[in-house]
Image (tube, rainbow, N blue to C red):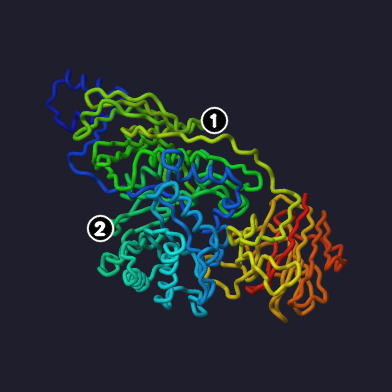
Amino acid sequence: MVLAAWTRVADWGRGASPVLVLLLLLVSSGSSEDYVLDSRGGLGREFDGIGGLSGGGATSRLLVNYPEPYRTQILDYLFKPNFGASLHILKVEIGGDAQTTDGTEPSHMHYEDDENFFRGYEWWLMKEAKKRNPNITLIGLPWAFPGWIGRGENWPYDFPDITAYYVVSWIIGAKQYHDLDIDYVGIWNERPFNSKYIKVLRHTLDKVGLTNVGIIASDNHWEIAAEMIVDPYLNEAVQIVGAHYPGTHTVVDALKTGKKLWSSEDYSTFNDEVGGGCWARILNQNYVNGNMTSTISWNLVASYYEELPFGRDGLMTAKEPWSGHYVVESPIWITAHTTQFTQPGWHYLQTVGHLEKGGSYVALTDGQGNLTIIIETMSHNHSICIRPPLPGFTVSPQNATFYVKGSFSELSSLQVWYSKLDFERSNLTLFRQRAPLKLSKGAFSLELDVDEVYTVTTITTGQKGFYPEPPKSQPFPSHYQDDFDVRNPPFSEAPNFADQAGVYEYFTNSSDPGEHVFTLRQVLTQRPITWVIDAGQTISVIGNYSWTDMTVKCDVYIETPENGGVFVAGRVDRGGSPTPSAKGLFFWVFADGSYSVTADLERHIVLKKGLSGVRAREWHTLTLHIHGLVASGMLNGYPLWKDVFTFGSHNGWAAIGTRSFEPAQFDNFSVDAS
C-alpha cells in the first residue's frame, strides 16, 4: 500500500514538499482503496442475463420423476423470480437420439417422415420455466442429429437445407404444440461450424417468418469471429458470438465483429463451495475481463446418476426422485447475487474492474435510477473451475470505498446481501441480508475478506426463498419393478431408466391381445450423427451403482428376425461417453436361437455361449442372477446356464439393451439387489 502510494506521489510531481509527501503517504497507507462508479461517461454493454443449460445430455433426466411437492420446489429454486437462482435464461438440448455426456435425449424426428413434439422432457421444462418467469430467454442447441440427416454420413453439413429444415421444425413445433417462443438457436455444440449452413439456417428462419429468432455461433471457441470479420454475410447471419469455457477472456477478432459476446456454456464444476467460488468469480470476470454479457451454466440441475460423467456439476442437485431428496447447493445463492437484482436490458457501467488486492466488481443500472453492484473476492484455490486451467493470483483482505457519481450521486442508502465461503472454519454464509448501507457524501466503504460476495443495490425485492427440508436421502430401492402399463404417460421415457445409447419409449402394442399391450420399446433403427463415440449397442441403465448382488428379470421381444438380439445386465460400470467400454454381466439372447454371456457390452469377453431356442417375435422371460463370484441365467423360468465366473466389474447398475440399433420391446422389468 505504501509503495503504491509513493508511486502515485511520484507520478504527480517530484517538487512537492517533504511534509506534504509524508502526509500523503500516511493517508494512503490506510486500509482503503477508492473506486468510482459513474454513469456520466456513458454506459457499457447491455446485460443479457444469467442462465442454466438442460441437456448435453440428459442432465435433467431424473427431475421429471420427482413427486410433488418436491418437483415444484426444485423448479422454484431454479426459475422463480426473487426466490432462488431466478434464472434469466434456459438453454436446452435439441435432442438428437445420441449420447451427449450423461445419456441420450430423443429427437422430435427419429426419421424423415416422423414428427413428435412430445418426446423427452425439455418441452415440459421450458414451459415450467416460462410459467414462473414469462420473460425468460429460451435457447435450443443440437449436440447430435438423427442419422437420416447425414444420408449415410456422420456429418450434418453435407445437406444444409435438410439440417436447417430439421432445426427450424423444432422451433415451429415448440410454438405450435407448446406455445413456446424460442429466442435463439445454435449450430452444433462444440463441433466445427460451417458458414454455408449458418447462412442457410438464417435464410430458412427468415423465410418462415422467424426473423426474431437469433443465431448463436459457434458454441465452441472464438474461432468463428475471424471468419465473421471478413465475411459480411456470415456476420449478418449471426446475432451472438458464443464461446464455451473462455476462462473469462475474449479475443480481438470477437470484439471486432461488433456483436454481443456470451459465455454460452461455462462452469461445469462440482457444486460444492469451490464450485460456488468458481461461479462467483466468472459471473463477474467474464464481463470485467472479456466483455461477455451473459454466462450460462452447464448444467442447470444435477439430476442424473452421480456416477455418470461430471456428477453433481449442476447449480443444485436433484438425483433422487424415489426419495424426494434434493440439495440447494451454494451456486444457487451465488447466482441470486446477480439475478435477483438485475434484469436483461440493464447496462453495465463502464467503471467496472478488479480490486486492488484481488477480486472484482461490476455495476449495472436500469437507466431509471436503479443501481446494483456485485463484488467478489474469490481466492485462487477456492474458485477453480473444471476448465480451463486457472492462472495463479492472490487475494487479500482489503478495505474498499466506492464513490457513486453522476445520476447516482443523490443515493442515501443501499441494500446489502452477503455470502461468505469460509473454507477454513466451514462457517458458510449464503445470501444473507445485512443492514442497509448509509452513504456519506456519495460514498460507502466495505471491509472485504477473502472468498466473499456482496451485492449492494437499490433493489428492495431480494429474497432468500425457503421450503421445508425435503425428505432425507435414500438409496435407490433394492426391490424395484415396472410393468410399463401406463395408458397416457406424461413423458415418453419410463421413470429412472437412463438411456446411454438408443432411445427407449413407452409403446402401445395394439397387435398384442395378451398381457404385453403396454411395453418399453427401443425405437432407433439407424445410428445417429454422433457427438461422442456412441456404443454400437443400445443400453439403458437403472438403479444403484453400488449394487453387487442382484437378480434382474425382464420379458423381452426381439422384433428383427435372424440377426436381432437383446440383453439384461447387472453390475454395469460405465455410462456417458465411456459407455462402449462398459463392463458387467450381460445375458444375451438372439433371434438365431443362440445365447451368450459376456463381461462387456461390446461382447469381446465371452464367458458362456450356447443354444437357447429363442426366436424373434415371441415373448420370452430372461432372469439374470448374480451372487458373489458366480452368475446364472434362466429362460422362461428354466435354468439355461449357471456357475459362470463373474469377470471384471464388481458393482454397478442394472440394464436392458439390444444387439444393435434395432426395434425391441421390454416388459415386466424387476430387480432385487443388495
Amino acid beneath label 1: Ser
User: Which numbered circle lies on residue 248?
Assistant: none
Image check: 166 left or right of 549? Answer: left
Say which of 639 and 618 sits in front: 618
Image point 31% across, 33% down: which residue?
Answer: 458
Q: Quick one: quadrant of the N terminus? A: top left
Image check: 457 left or right of 471? Answer: left
Q: In terms of secondary structure, where does tag 2 sit?
A: loop
Say which of 424 and 134 sits in front: 134
Q: Which residue is mark 1?
A: 426
Separation (CA) of disc 2 from disc 1: 45 Å
Give neighbour class at mark 2: few <14, some 14-19, many 20+ (Cα, 10 Å): some
Say which of 561 and 22 sits in front: 561
Image check: 66 left or right of 544? Answer: left
How many circles with numbers are drawn on the protein?
A: 2
Residue 491 quadrant: bottom right
In x, y percent, where is residue 274?
50, 40
Image point 28% across, 58% down: which residue?
Answer: 259
Location of residue 463 with respect to 519 vertically, above or below: above
Q: Is residue 195 visible?
A: no
User: Which numbered circle lies on residue 258?
Assistant: 2
Query: Contact (CB < 8 A) between labels 2 and 1?
Result: no
2 vs 1, front mark: 2
Image point 65% across, 44% down: which residue?
Answer: 323
In x, y percent, where is residue 145?
50, 69
In x, y percent, where is residue 210?
34, 66
Amino acid beneath label 2: Gly
Mark earlier in primary sequence (2, 1): 2
